[in-house]
Image (cartoon, grey):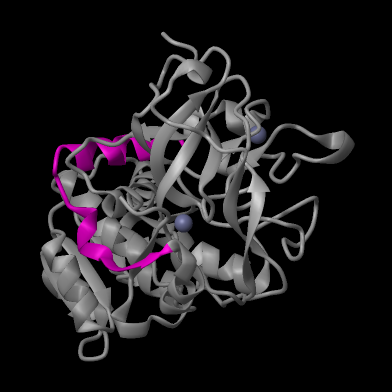
Amino acid sequence: MKPADQDSSFSIPSTMKAWVLDDPGQLRLTEKPVPQPGPAEVLIRIDAVAFCDGDIRIITRGPPALIQGGLPFNKNFTPGHEYMGRVVKLGAGVDEYEIGERVAVEVHFGCGRCERCRAGMYTSCINYGMDCGTHNKGHRANGFTTDGGFAEYAVNNVNTLVHVPDDIGDEEATLIVTAGTAMYALDTLGGLIAGQTVVVTGPGAIGLMGVAVAKALGADPVILTGTRDTRLNLGKQLGADHLININTENPVEAVKRITKGKGAHYVLECSGNPNGLNDGMDMVMRGGKICLIGFANEPVPVDLGKLVRNHISVFGIRGEGKSATHRAAALVAMKRFRPKIIHTHTFPMDELPTAFKYSRDRIDNAIKVVVKMRDN
Ligand SMILES: [Zn+2]
Ligand SMILES: [Zn+2]
């Protein structure tokens, strides 16, 4: 293999354009040095990046970003974590990827040395955000604790990359990590869902990918609940067998009707509705399992007695651990579903703050808003 520095197909500048977060809600375009890949890392030329609810939260409020041990504001920090592009430089010892290869990323590398990372739960790394000062453990979660994808280049560990086939477009490839989160939720519930009932509550990006992945893995039926018919209909295109608009039908009664009174095997709670867990407990059958992906921003009362009496298991997940993104990418490569269905808008790099507004305010029914970081 030729050393990356001698590959002439990509000329890598010394500085790059990058958006940084100043005060809450304020993004500013600036110049930064192009980062250099260390051992087990590659440099990615970013072609496209999607906005996620996590970005909105970081840009407006700060957490879960953690920069130099604190809030991410006015620290020259570049957010953005759902990006894709081409490998343009290899760090020492990297032979897993080639120069020019198209890749999408998972967000979290973790620290690679704590108990959770060693178990594949790197999204729950004990050393989250500890990549600075005397306690530096080398943790990375690009766009959360280290520089992310609202820039022309980023450095990624090889373990956070997935190959993107040529017939998957740039915008669509940014959505693979969203499908990875849905996959991780189903993994956490046990993964054996073929022929079993999955209810997905909340047709946001992750909920819709939850429908798609559950169906691709053989769940039957898949039931989607929500309030907006436009989004529910996208769920139908992604494989939902039953749509329930909770403005016109009680979702618990509807699930009972569809399952002939038995209840569902699994609920993926993606709405963040304060009553989501209570409703989920009424939707699953005895011994059922609920995975919380969306979450309410305030503490909520829960009928724990019902949970115990009915032997219900509840899981919370964060992000996309245990290489779930690789499995989601495999389903996308096999065309088992098309994430592109949830992509609604594209903006050029210079208009990234407009993309932020579209995503935050759901302007023009925005779901996944993508920024193309270069013209190609
Ligand atoms: Zn995200
Ligand atoms: Zn760790």
Left or right side of 61 for 213 = left
- Above or below 214: residue 97: above
Give the percent coordinates (x, y) of residue 280: 36, 68
Instruction: Say which quadrant the N terminus sits in.
Output: top left
- Whether 349 is among the magenta residues is no
Q: Residue at x 16, y 60 (%)?
A: 238
Give the percent coordinates (x, y) of residue 101: 34, 29
Q: Relative to the observer, which residue lies in front, 216 or 163? A: 163
One can see residue 320 in this view: yes
Q: Residue at x 66, y 72 (%)?
A: 61
Q: Residue at x 79, y 50 (%)?
A: 68
Q: Quadrant of residue 21?
A: bottom right
One can see residue 263 in this view: no
Which residue lies most toward the right here?
A: 134
- Whether 336 is among the magenta residues is yes
The part of the chain drawn in magenta is: 321-348
Q: Residue at x 56, y 21 (%)?
A: 91
- How many numbered discs? 0
Q: Relative to the observer, which residue lies in front, 171 or 229? A: 171
- Above or below 32: residue 157: above
Give the percent coordinates (x, y) of residue 320: 45, 45
Left or right side of 193 for 81 = right
